[in-house]
């Protein structure tokens, strides 16, 4: 009898749970050996990776995938180089597992602290990019978690080829093959099963479009680490340095248009508008950015800006479009961000210390910046080595999620025959 999707996913889940117990006690050296061996296997398997990826690209073209999707799908030699380097970098990162902190003696005589431990089994659902398979597998492995990876159907052959290399690395280190499993069926029912197995899966990380993340957030019976939108702001304060403001507002929008940490709304204090907006409008015009402004912005910039709608303030464009609003105070800027933002990343440009402190304290986002581009909101830029995604939730991880975000803590207690009286 043919195995059902639910039975198949249950089998993967059960195997992952068993593997997670082995990984939880694996040494740092063992995990690093697996990562280094997987890197070597990837390097040796370049012809097989190219052939598998060619099958996916051919199928993608036949099904009408757009140029941007095909670009994300392609495993170029440079991207294979990046995957190999990524594995080697994660191997060099400090291992958080087993770290004990805040040990202290209590009046009863016992000693209490906290130990960092893996989450257990992490399910990751993603689209298009085969390199995510390596990013996710390496971070989960280093943090002692088993992982079940469900990539997009358009990358099935590429993901399976990458998984074989990871499997060789696990075998080299004496770790169970089920520590990293790539779902081999393209049936969408696999996603529904994966997010509904709390007995076998401890957390789900979705990486993809808003529709995918909304569906998983709505239907999951397992905790989800995610962000829905990247509606990021830069606020140019009345005490801003003009040069810094122009440089940051340019970079935050135009360094790349698609990432979730790209600025979508520029807020400018009325007192600074005439100094920063005209030169910025020139820069944006040269770079093909469409400006949508509030009435005062349109009055100042004339034909360089279209009238913004109410919807613009809450839109993540992922495109060369920017909304601009003039405000009369820091209070108004903070109110706008907390009302329309997505709690992702927001920045203030100011030379006024107390304004910077207020912004840091009162803006309720996962990353809040002073005199820096929002484009820095990234695990690699934060020194995490890599990231599995960005979380705008408040439990359990927030901001870029690296190794530590894939762990939890438990209390540990040391005594010497102590009993409670």
Image (cartoon, rainbow, N blue to C red):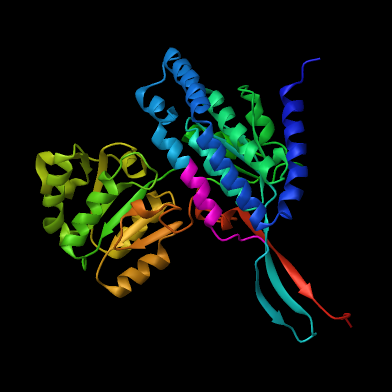
Q: Which of the 4 quarters of the picture holds residue 309?
A: top left
* Residue 247 located left or right of residue 376: left
In this view, the residue farthest toward the top is 62
The magenta stretch spans residue 93: yes
**349 shown above or below 75:** below
What residue sits 74% from the left and 55% below the top?
A: 25
Residue 393 seen in render: no
Magenta stretch bounds: 84-97
Q: Quadrant of the N terminus?
A: top right
Residue 94 seen in render: yes
Q: Which of the 4 quarters of the picture holds residue 364?
A: bottom left
Observer-nearest residue: 346 or 144?
144
* Residue 132 located left or right of residue 224: left
* Residue 197 located left or right of residue 240: right
The magenta stretch spans residue 218: no
* Magenta-colored segment: predominant secondary structure: helix
What residue sits 48% from the left and 54% below the top?
A: 385
Tag count: 0
What residue sits 48% from the left and 30% below the top?
A: 128
**263 shown above or below 92:** above
**184 shown above or below 360:** above
Observer-nearest residue: 127 or 416?
416
* Residue 203 located left or right of residue 324: right
Observer-nearest residue: 40 or 91?
40
What residue sits 21% from the left and 59% below the top?
A: 245
């Amino acid at each position: 009898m043919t195995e059902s999707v639910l039975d198949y996913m249950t089998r993967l889940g059960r195997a992952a749970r068993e593997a997670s117990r082995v990984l939880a006690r694996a040494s740092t050296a063992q995990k690093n050996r697996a990562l280094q061996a997987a890197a070597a296997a990837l390097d040796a398997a370049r012809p097989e990776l190219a052939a598998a990826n060619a099958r996916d690209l051919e199928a993608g073209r036949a099904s009408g995938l757009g140029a941007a999707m095909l670009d994300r799908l392609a495993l170029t030699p440079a991207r294979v180089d990046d995957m190999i380097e990524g594995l080697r970098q994660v191997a060099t990162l400090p291992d958080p597992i087993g770290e004990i902190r805040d040990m202290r003696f209590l009046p009863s005589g016992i000693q209490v602290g906290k130990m960092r431990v893996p989450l257990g089994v992490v399910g990751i659902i993603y689209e298009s990019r085969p390199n995510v398979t390596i990013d996710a597998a390496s971070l989960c492995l280093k943090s002692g978690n088993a992982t079940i990876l469900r990539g997009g159907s358009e990358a099935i052959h590429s993901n399976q080829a990458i998984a074989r290399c990871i499997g060789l690395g696990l075998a080299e280190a004496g770790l169970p093959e089920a520590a990293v499993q790539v779902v081999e069926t393209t049936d969408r029912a696999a996603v529904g099963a994966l997010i509904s197995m709390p007995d076998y899966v401890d957390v789900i990380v979705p990486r993809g479009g808003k529709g995918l993340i909304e569906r998983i957030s709505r239907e999951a019976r397992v905790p989800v680490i995610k962000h829905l939108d990247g509606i990021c702001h830069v606020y140019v304060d009345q005490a801003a340095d003009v040069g810094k403001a122009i440089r940051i507002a340019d970079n935050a929008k135009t360094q790349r248009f698609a990432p979730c940490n790209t600025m979508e709304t520029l807020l400018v204090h009325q007192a600074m508008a005439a100094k920063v907006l005209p030169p910025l409008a020139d820069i944006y015009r040269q770079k093909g950015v469409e400006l949508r402004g509030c009435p005062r912005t349109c009055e100042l910039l004339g034909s360089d800006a279209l009238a913004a709608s109410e919807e613009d303030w809450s839109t993540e464009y992922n495109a060369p479009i920017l909304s601009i609003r003039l405000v009369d105070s820091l209070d108004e800027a903070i109110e706008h961000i907390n009302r329309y933002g997505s709690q992702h990343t927001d920045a203030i440009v100011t030379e006024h210390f107390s304004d910077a402190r207020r912004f840091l304290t009162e803006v309720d986002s996962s990353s809040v910046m002073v005199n820096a581009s929002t484009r820095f909101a990234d695990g690699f830029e934060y020194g995490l080595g890599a990231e599995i995604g960005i979380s705008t939730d408040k439990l359990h991880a927030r901001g870029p999620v690296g190794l530590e975000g894939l762990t939890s803590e438990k209390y540990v207690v040391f005594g010497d025959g102590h009993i409670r009286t």
